[in-house]
Image (cartoon, rainbow, N blue to C red):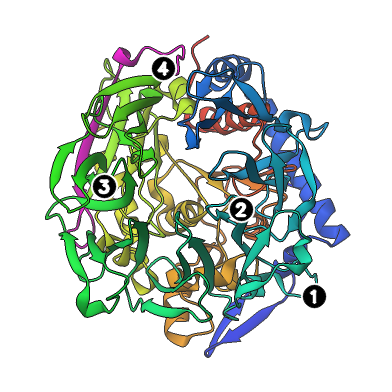
């Protein structure tokens, strides 16, 4: 491979007595003209290489059929108004609509397709007021996390010229019951504040419509700790205000007060435990993993909020992990996972079981969406071979009916989904899902695409992925591994893959790969792996730890330099998940697996496609640049390519055409390495 040249520098840090070479430190400075030129050269090289792969036209046609679709989200109901998102076969971006009543005339509220000529400005969060007459929403340039919050009048569609709030990266507006104001998390935008320190500057503010945001009163001050998140919400009746101070994905504190009182009081201090709270009819319902790794629910009376007075309402389930709680139709709706598949249960407000929601199959379902005092509710269901469908249900009767369907040119009966289990290095039982054609022959030579995540208490569910169908039709197998570090089995599962136990995640992944070879699905030369963000760290560690086990790697918007990750982007907020190289004990663990620091010259690494985004303000793209430079210099005969998506953030660009182009490159790379031929 005749890569664009990359120079090295003799940079070596000594950390806790250990020399740590960093020859590509210069690639961290994206503002440097030299780095910009290097990025352009690498991206051009990668795209020209991928453009020569046969079969791209067939892939593009198939993805066009699969990605441009007519779909409808579950609605948010405010007053008698229904708000929902619709995608169209002839539009690049989803459009926000509203109706007066469920059967009213559909009206466009926000169409981000019209916001910029090149489609680079995106719609972020949106939140209607309780009377349905105002809408708070964010606009995000380049689909990045940074956002500006706006307010519009629903009836006229006019955007307020006064209610414009920069610093809305974490805003999450919470409306007061009079629909005249909202609480929100505000983040200063001064360039003088180091990016990695900004989360500690978050404040909870109150904005009253029609007043200058600069005058918004601070309701709760900043924590000053960049490892924390701060957010808050007001109860629907406007009586209670809550503030969450969250440290990582394992613990948080809740502060509260009655609106009008001066000071907040501590409801609970999270020491190794997480808490979330809903309020209805002067009662707090607290979901927590305190003393219950699979979570449980407590009832708390505001007049007796002390921890000793909490009453357990829903005990921990012995086999299913409780994922979320909503109050709908004067009932509790609880979402559970059992072996990574969804169950949704309805209970009375007193905790008495009523029924399990009748799901249309085995797969991934959302919890019930709705209002606390209305009987109608909605949920979304999908599976690996079933596109997302929206269902309406009656909380009181359990009746379920289809509210919106997605029709795509696929034949679900052609495919099969299996769940299997394997044993990790330490004997832990690890689940995995396998999707393939029914006529697949297990001959030890199938092309397999394995993906995973394993972090931040995030669960990978058996949900729909439109991009996998060309792979399946070409005789490939798609595999999702449910690794430790995720939330599939509750807190204990997460903790087993966090901090000093992070290597367990990589061991689980290797074990799944070995299972696929042992069970004659594939062989290492035809086994591809992919992952993004923390999943990018996963596949980066996999290829540097076990290069002989994998044939191809697609690494997307990853963390890879774990020694310096906390100095960039949102890195300090992840210290509770990974630890920090500033701490000697953490450094020993982190340095032992940090992928960038384990690229060895002369090693036969699998082929690598690195997919980065130029406006990723969550995980700095420096990780992708430095790692690719190191792998290219290692001298492997397999390609190591860096593809950079322009005008895109951590989640990629939100235009369908760009998603198609990205997927064509993704699967063209796999076909060129693994020898896959696409159906015409």
Q: Earlier in the sequence, mark 4 or mark 1?
A: 1
In whole angstroms, how far apart are the C-alphas of marks 4 and 3? 37 Å
Are dots 4 and 3 in contact, CB under 8 Å? no
Mark 4 or 2: in front is 4
Residue 21, by quadrant, is bottom right
Are dots 2 and 1 in contact, CB under 8 Å? no
Identify residue for label 3: 334
Q: Residue at x 75, y 38 (%)?
A: 120
- Secondary structure beneath dot 1 equals loop
Q: Earlier in the sequence, mark 3 or mark 1?
A: 1
| Along the line of sight, the residue nearer the viewer: 164 or 337 | 164
Q: Label 4: few (<14), some or many (≥20) within 10 Å?
A: some
In whole angstroms, how far apart are the C-alphas of marks 4 and 1? 53 Å
| Along the line of sight, the residue nearer the viewer: 12 or 383 | 383
Q: Earlier in the sequence, mark 4 or mark 2?
A: 4
In whole angstroms, how far apart are the C-alphas of marks 2 and 1? 41 Å
Identify residue for label 1: 192
Which segment did they paint magenta?
404-429
């Amino acid at each position: 491979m005749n890569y664009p040249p990359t120079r090295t520098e003799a940079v070596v840090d000594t950390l806790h007595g250990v020399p740590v070479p960093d020859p590509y430190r210069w690639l961290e400075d994206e503002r440097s003209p030299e780095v910009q030129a290097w990025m352009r050269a690498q991206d051009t090289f990668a795209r020209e290489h991928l453009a020569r792969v046969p079969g791209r036209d067939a892939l593009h046609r198939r993805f066009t059929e699969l990605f441009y679709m007519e779909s409808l989200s579950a609605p948010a109901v405010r007053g008698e108004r229904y708000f929902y998102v619709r995608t169209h076969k002839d539009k690049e971006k989803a459009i926000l609509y509203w109706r007066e009543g469920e059967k009213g005339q559909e009206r466009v509220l926000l169409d981000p397709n019209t916001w910029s000529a090149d489609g680079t400005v995106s719609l972020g969060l949106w939140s209607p007021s309780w009377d349905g007459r105002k809408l708070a929403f964010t606009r995000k340039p380049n689909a990045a996390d940074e956002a500006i919050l706006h307010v519009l009048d629903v009836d006229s569609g006019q955007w307020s010229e006064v209610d414009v709030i920069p610093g809305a990266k974490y805003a999450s507006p919470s409306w007061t019951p009079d629909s005249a104001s909202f609480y929100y998390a505000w983040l200063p935008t001064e360039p003088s504040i180091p990016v990695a320190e900004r989360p500690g500057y978050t404040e909870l503010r109150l904005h009253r419509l029609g007043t200058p945001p600069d005058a918004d009163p601070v309701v709760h001050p900043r924590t000053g700790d960049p490892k924390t998140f701060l957010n808050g919400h007001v109860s629907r009746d406007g009586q209670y205000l809550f503030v969450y101070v969250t440290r990582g994905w394992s613990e948080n504190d809740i502060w509260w007060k009655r609106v009008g009182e001066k000071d907040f009081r501590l409801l609970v201090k999270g020491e190794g435990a997480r808490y979330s709270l809903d309020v209805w009819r002067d009662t707090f319902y607290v979901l927590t993993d305190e003393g219950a790794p699979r979570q449980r629910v407590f009832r708390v009376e505001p007049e007796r909020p002390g921890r000793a007075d909490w009453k357990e309402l829903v005990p921990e389930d012995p086999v299913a992990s409780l994922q979320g709680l909503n109050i709908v139709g004067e009932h509790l709706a609880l979402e559970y996972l059992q072996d990574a598949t969804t169950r949704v249960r309805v209970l009375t407000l007193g905790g008495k079981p009523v029924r399990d929601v009748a799901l249309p199959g085995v797969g991934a379902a959302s919890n019930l969406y709705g209002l606390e005092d209305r009987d109608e509710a909605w949920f979304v269901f999908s599976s690996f071979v079933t596109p997302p469908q929206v269902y309406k249900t009656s909380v009181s009767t359990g009746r379920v009916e289809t509210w919106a369907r997605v029709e795509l040119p696929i034949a679900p009966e052609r495919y099969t989904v299996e769940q299997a289990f394997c044993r990790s290095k330490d004997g832990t039982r690890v689940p995995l899902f396998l999707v393939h054609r029914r006529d697949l022959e297990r001959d030890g030579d199938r092309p397999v695409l394995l993906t995973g995540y394993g972090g931040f208490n995030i669960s990978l569910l058996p949900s729909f992925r439109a991009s996998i169908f060309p792979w399946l039709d070409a005789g490939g197998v798609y595999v999702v591994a449910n690794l430790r570090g995720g939330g599939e089995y509750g807190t204990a599962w997460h903790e087993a893959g966090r901090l000093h136990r992070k290597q367990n995640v990589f061991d689980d992944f290797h074990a799944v790969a070995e299972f696929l070879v042992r069970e004659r699905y594939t062989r290492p030369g035809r086994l591809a792996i992919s992952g993004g963000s923390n999943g990018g760290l996963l596949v980066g560690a996999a290829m540097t730890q076990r290069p002989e086990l994998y044939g191809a790697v697609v690494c997307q918007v990853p963390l890879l330099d774990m020694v310096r990750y906390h100095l960039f982007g949102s890195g300090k907020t992840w210290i509770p998940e990974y630890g920090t190289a500033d701490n000697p004990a953490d450094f020993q663990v982190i340095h032992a697996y940090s992928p960038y620091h384990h690229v060895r010259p002369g090693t036969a690494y699998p082929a690598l496609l690195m997919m980065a985004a130029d406006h990723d303000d969550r995980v700095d793209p420096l990780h992708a640049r430095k790692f690719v430079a190191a792998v290219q210099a290692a001298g492997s005969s397999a390609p190591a390519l860096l593809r950079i998506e322009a005008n895109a953030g951590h989640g990629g660009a939100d235009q369908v055409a760009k998603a198609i182009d990205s997927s064509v490159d993704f699967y063209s790379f796999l076909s060129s390495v693994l020898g896959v031929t696409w159906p015409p």
